[in-house]
Image (cartoon, rainbow, N blue to C red):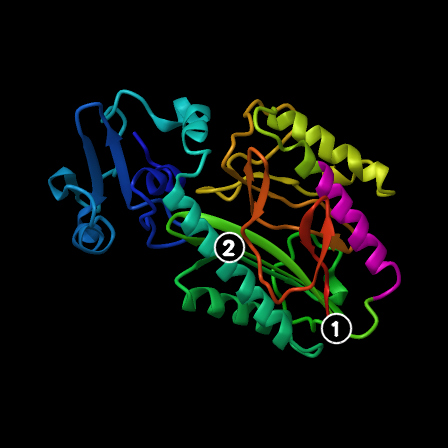
Amino acid sequence: MLRSHGAVSWYLDGIRTHVSHAGDPVVAVVVDRSADEIRIFANEADRIADEELGGFDRASVHAVPWFEPLAPAGVAALDEAEVAAELRAARASLLPAERERFRRLGRASAEVIGRVAADVEPDWTERRAAAALAAGLVERGIDPLVVLVAGASRLAHRHPLPTDAPLGRRAMLVVCGRRHGLIANVTRWVGFGDAGEGAPDRERRILEVERAFLEATTPGARLGDVFAAGVAAYADQGFDAAEWRRHHQGGAAGYVGRDPRAVPGVDDVVHAGQAFAWNPTAPGAKVEDTLVRDADGFEVLTVDPAWPTIEVGGLPRPLALMR
């Protein structure tokens, strides 16, 4: 039984599985060797069959009354939670069509955040900036799963939900957007005039921490070992060695925001053709992009040709946009 947004959307080739972003999926799949049963709440069945399941046999759709459980216990012999690691491995290496979708999503997400960063002014509130980010994503068919904005007065917060505070002289913009089931993650910084004492230095050093994560992300490597190599770089770059404890560091990406999120000791391995979104952070510093790890290097998916970059480890990495 596949019942999560990530697993169902992956298995059904990127269909939209939600009505409410905060709700459970309205689609589930019983996967069998002989045939699949696509279970959909009856009040959603016609729309999903018409608009999402064009490439699938509609005879396999089972409409479930909205007042009954979509995926009751016992309807399948095995639940996805029992084989979570195996399913992550199965969807880790992107197929060519998935990769092209991800590439287009990444570029669109980066361009949205770039255009908003070019438009904002110091007297804009964080909410006004967030509204512009969300609108830009929705206009491109991207679900805005996460929109964060921190003005100069709130940069101490690692997950800054937008408020009425003004952006001031320096701001962080973050979006996590989903389209065709895939999720792109991107963070950018914008400054006005003087970025503030130490900001450029922190920016360069956090890029070196990210470089440690990326250089350790090699096919066959254990994700727990990649995590250890990355977090060790905080002290090497003059940050507090315990900085990694104050915010998650990212991990594999794809049909789940982090698939999985990297933590000490995690046993998943890196696959060629797998997407990653590392996001090392420190006070006043953060970097985050979505990339694909190939056998011979990385492709940055969340790329905006108009954004200022610097080469780090052979990759174009984002700098703050100074206005």
* Mark 2 closeness class: few <14, some 14–19, many ≥20 residues within 10 Å: many
In this picture, residue 226 sits left or right of residue 284: left
Residue closest to the far top: 77
Residue 130 in picture, x, y percent from top left? 56, 67
Q: Residue at x 64, y 50 (%)?
A: 288
Q: Which mark is residue 106?
A: 2
Q: Which mark is residue 168?
A: 1
Which picture quadrant has residue 175?
bottom right
Q: Secondary structure at mark 2?
A: helix
Residue 85 in picture, x, y percent from top left? 46, 25
In this picture, residue 115 sits left or right of residue 94: right
Question: In this picture, which residue range is highlighted in magenta?
Answer: 196-212
In this picture, residue 179 sits left or right of residue 305: left
Q: Nearer the viewer, residue 95 or 166?
A: 95
Residue closest to the far left: 59
Q: Residue at x 40, y 27 (%)?
A: 81
Task: Give the amino acid at mark 1.
Answer: Gly
Which picture quadrant has residue 142?
bottom left
Q: Is residue 250 visible?
A: yes
Quadrant containing the N terminus in the rendered view:
top left
Q: Is residue 177 visible?
A: no
Q: Which mark is residue 158?
A: none
Task: Give the amino acid at mark 2.
Answer: Gly
Residue 36 in picture, x, y percent from top left? 20, 32
In this picture, residue 288 sits left or right of residue 146: right
Q: Secondary structure at mark 1?
A: loop
Q: Nearer the viewer, residue 151 or 272?
A: 272
Q: Are marks 1 and 2 in contact (CB under 8 Å)?
A: no
Residue 169 in picture, x, y percent from top left? 77, 72
Q: Is residue 204 on the magenta stretch? A: yes
